[in-house]
Image: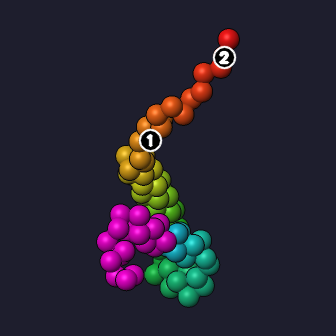
Amino acid sequence: MIECCLDHPYVTMQFQLDAINLMLHDLGMVDDDLRHRAAFHGCTRELADLREELRDYLTQRKRTVKAHDAIDHSAMLPIRAAPSGSRSRSAS
């Protein structure tokens, strides 16, 4: 039964947001091995610049996915008609 839901736009959007959040978290973590390798290769500044560029890109991508999801959900909102006779007129 869960397989039928995997293609649902909300689920797909949630998977994208989860992946973006994981990458943003990972980019925020200190990776000493990577820092040492960058220092060895002399590209510490370039690595920091790339990390910042990736963070900016992923943050913008996250906003785009959320905005797209908000548009999709607003288009799917049901239009409810007021039930006939639901408003009572007050006697004057």
Amino acid at the residue labelled 2: Ala
Would residue 50 be visible to someone looking at this image?
no
Tag 2 residue: 91
Distance of label 2 from label 1 (alpha carbons): 27 Å
Q: Residue at x 48, y 37 (%)?
A: 83
Q: Amino acid at mark 1?
A: Arg
Decide which of tag 2 and tag 1 comes sooner along the chain: 1
Percent coordinates x, y for residue 45 in the rendering: 52, 67
Q: Classify residue 91 as left or right of residue 86.
A: right
Q: Is residue 86 visible?
A: yes
- Quarter-wise, where is residue 27 in the image? bottom right
The percent coordinates of residue 25 (x first, y second) are 57, 72
Between 17 and 3, the one nearer to me in the picture: 3
Most common secondary structure along the magenta stretch: helix
State whether residue 83 is above or below residue 45: above
Residue 9 position in % (x across, y down): 35, 63
| Residue pictured at 46% horizontal, 81% vertical | 41
Identify which residue is drawn at 42% across, 48% down. Answer: 77
How many marks on residues?
A: 2
Give the extent of the magenta segment: 1-19
Q: Residue furthest bottom?
A: 33
Give the foreground label among 2 and 1: 2
**From the viewer's perspective, is 66 left or right of 9?**
right
Q: Residues within 10 Å of mark 2 (few under 14, many from 20)?
A: few
The structure's colour scheme is rainbow
User: Helix, strand, or loop for circle 1?
Assistant: loop
Residue 13: percent from the left, percent from the top? 41, 64
Mark 1 Cα shell of 10 Å, populated few (<14), some (14-19), many (≥20): few
Identify which residue is drawn at 61% across, 76% down: 29
Quadrant including the C terminus:
top right
- List the residue tagged with mark 1: 80
